[in-house]
Amino acid sequence: MKNNTTLLTIIVYAVLLASFSTLINDIREFDLMQFKNFENWSKTAVKGKSWFTSENAILWSNYVITIGLFFWRGYLIYGFTHFISILREIEKKHYFSQKNINSFKKIGNVFITYTINVFILKVLLAFIEKSSFRFFNEFKNELTFLIPCGLAFYLLSEIFKRAKTIEEENELTV
Amino acid sequence: MPIIVHLDIMLAKQKMKSKDLAEKIGITTANLSILKSGKAKAIRFSTLEAICEALDCQPSDILEYVKE
């Protein structure tokens, strides 16, 4: 059991490291310095044009949404860190601890929140870029994987809650 | 809990110490203390049988139901 937990901990750390480095690399490639271009926005903007249709506004929204996507990816990585706390509890043989129940619930929350928010941002991005948005394609990519996972973790937290009560009752059975 | 455990009374009647009873029935003193304090959620028939045998009494001498 201990060997399995150690192996799982190593895998989780590797996944975390890989996803974090990918995120950092994507942010670096995105080049945050391009925001400097917007410094003179107020000076260059055509006064008569409406704000929503101006090219700068569209670009600006595009960047904001992309940064939003980065933020949610970071949030997903934060969700993954809860696996470490679960594995630590299992190592201590505290299988049905309150910490594990909370971690499972948090992971479920992170997965569902991430999927919903990324989905919304992608819809907005498609709307701004006026590109064709294939709802079912996005639906397939985002929702078929993480939403069921999130729901499964919610269920696990409920099952663990019940298991904790039973364990306590068992300990108090003479 | 509406179930009251009268183990103290029975122990006093039999002039037996908790430690001796725990040893006799094969449970830890910590578990016996849980039973005596009324914190126990359940009692096994085997434990009840052992207690009755050790204290020479009936289950009704140890357990009492009081309406809340």
Image (tube, rainbow, N blue to C red):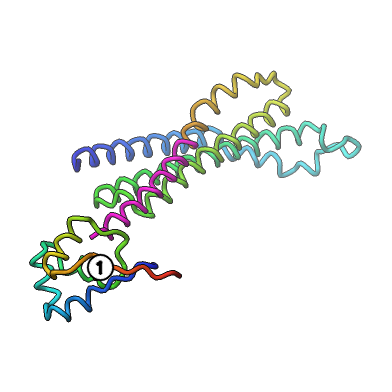
Q: Is residue A75 left or right of residue A95?
A: right
Q: Which residue is mark 1?
A: B35
Quarter location, residue A48: top right
Quarter location, residue A123: top right
Q: Nearer the viewer, residue A160 or A86?
A: A160
Q: Nearer the viewer, residue A37 or B22?
A: B22
Residue at (73% x, 29% y) in the render: A128
Residue A54 percent across, percent down from the top left = 81, 33
Residue at (8% x, 67% y) in the render: B23
The residue segment tinted magenta is A151-174
Q: Nearer the viewer, residue B58 or A86?
A: B58
| Outermost right residue | A48
Residue A171 in magenta?
A: yes
Q: Is residue B42 above or below residue A156?
A: below
Residue at (20% x, 40% y) in the render: A1
Q: How many marks?
A: 1
Q: Is residue A93 left or right of residue B22?
A: right
Q: Main secondary structure of the magenta part?
A: helix
Residue B61 percent across, percent down from the top left = 24, 70
Q: Is residue B26 above or below residue A77?
A: below
Q: Is residue B29 left or right of residue A27?
A: left
Q: Is residue B51 above or below residue A38?
A: below
Residue at (19% x, 43% y) in the render: A2
The chain to which mark 1 is attached is B
- The C terminus of chain B appears in which quarter of the rendering? bottom left
